[in-house]
Amino acid sequence: MSSLKKYFFNNKNIPAKFSIFYLLTGIFGIISLDKFIKIFFQYNNVSEQGPLTIGLLFFMLMGLLVFIILNHMQKVIKRIDRSYNDLKEKDKQRLIPYEFALNNSVDAIYWFTLDARFIYVNEAACEMLGYTQDEFLEMKLEDMDPQFTRKTAKECMHSIRDTKDWRLETTQKKKNNSIFPVEVSGHAFKHNGVDYICAFGRDMTQRNNDRNRITTINHELQKSLEEKNILLKEIHHRVKNNMEIISSLLSMQLRRAKDDEVRYILKQSKSRINTMALVHEFLYLGENLAYINVHEYIKKLIDDIKELYISQNTRLEVELHIDELIFTTNRCIQIGMVLHELCVNSLKYAFKEDRENLLCIHMREKEDNIHIKIRDNGEGLENIKDLYKSESIGMQLIHSIVEDQLDATIEFKNNNGLECNIIFSKEEEEQ
């Protein structure tokens, strides 16, 4: 019974169900009236009371029928109205998060038809351009963006519809006619079979100001860096020149000295100064003011030492096997001074004019360490231990730099000549 009632009084197909209900009620009323009339005429005179009685009965029955019908219609209307209000409230509750997201978005959101007319804008759009939502609904795209015409505005809508991740940097005009930069992205969507465009606009004024400010700062920093580089180059140049002046003074003294030991001491002093000056020369001529290419530095250092210590009659072959290493100024000076002393010792004691002389210099990077090997093909030494306790300035300088500054290990041995091995960490300690 409840299912039958639910079927007949459901809000769907009201006209058909109401007609069936009216027909059934009418048939029931006619049958009931016919029965009542037959019973009435069995006990009453037809000629005296028949027409009036029939009329009264018909009127009463019709009134009852109309009351039933109207009462049912009123219930149906109330039920429809209640269902409509419930549905509207549910839709309202369901749309609250979306409305909140739209109205609280930082970006302006516009909905367009394909002919570039506004059908919706959020609160951010109203705040950004100064128009009300009602004013927007009377506007077209070209009213907001002066770069568009009626024709190009429509073309833009179709371009957004046909392009994935459509973007544009343009300008927009506020209600007070001020122009500001904006970045716009657009997407197409369908609703009830109709194409619409949803666009997101972001005010680029602050970003452009920040970008310009950063660009200005970068230019100033670049200018300051270039000035500092020029200054540092000039400093290295002057240090090199000062050392060359000292070297020239030593050369003058060297030419006047009579004693061979004094001449040798002056020559060594000049050579050591040239070793340090060479570092500043590389820094002045190079692009990097903090680091030096070790291979090029050592190659030039050996050439300078050969020119100073080797006579033209001495045949010397130099083998350089040096990895691509980059050292700081301080470390280059340390390694240069050590190599200088070791090479000078080989040139002084191991090499002869009447033989083929060989000097090998290896510098390899192994894991976290740097391995240096310097070997000559001289006669070597009978007592290697003497090198560890030698009181010569050269050996004292080597041990001081290796042990105290490089924090390295050093080993001398005979290997078809004298060989020196030095191992130190690749990482430099902060000075």
Image (spheres, rainbow, N blue to C red):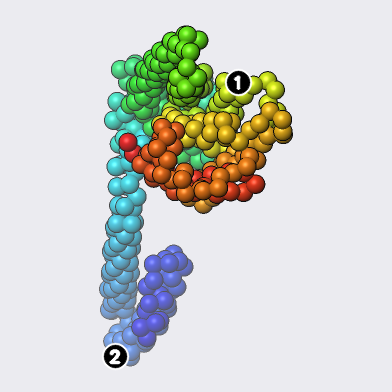
Q: Which one is nearer the viewer's eye here, 69 or 197? A: 197
Say which mark, if any, is on residue 307.
1
Q: Mark 1: few, some, or many residues within 10 Å (few <14, many ≥20)?
A: few
Residue 237 seen anywhere in this rendered image of the structure: no
Q: Is residue 393 left or right of residue 412?
A: left
Q: Residue at x 49, y 32 (%)?
A: 341
Amino acid of disc 1: Glu
Q: Nearer the viewer, mark 1 or mark 2?
A: 1
Instruction: Give how far across and how far down residue 257 sits, in percent.
Output: 47, 12
Q: Which one is nearer the viewer's eye here, 418 or 277? A: 418
Q: Residue at x 65, y 40 (%)?
A: 377
Question: How many marks overall?
Answer: 2
- Provide the secondary structure element on which disc 1 rests: helix
Instruction: Give how far across and how far down residue 130 sits, in percent.
Output: 29, 25
Kindly report the distance in space between the C-alpha atoms of the residues bearing marks 1 and 2.
158 Å
Q: Residue at x 36, y 28 (%)?
A: 207
Residue 400 seen anywhere in this rendered image of the structure: yes
Q: Is residue 346 left or right of residue 51?
A: right
Q: Residue at x 43, y 45 (%)?
A: 388
Q: Which one is nearer the viewer's eye here, 358 or 258? A: 258
Instruction: Give how far across and how far down residue 191 sits, in percent.
Output: 49, 47
Q: Is residue 379 left or right of residue 69?
A: right
Amino acid of disc 2: Tyr
In the rendered image, the vertical position of residue 172 relative to residue 159, given as above or below: above
Q: Is residue 11 left or right of residue 74?
A: right
The residue that label 2 is drawn on is 43
In the rendered image, the vertical position of residue 285 relative to residue 17, given as above or below: above
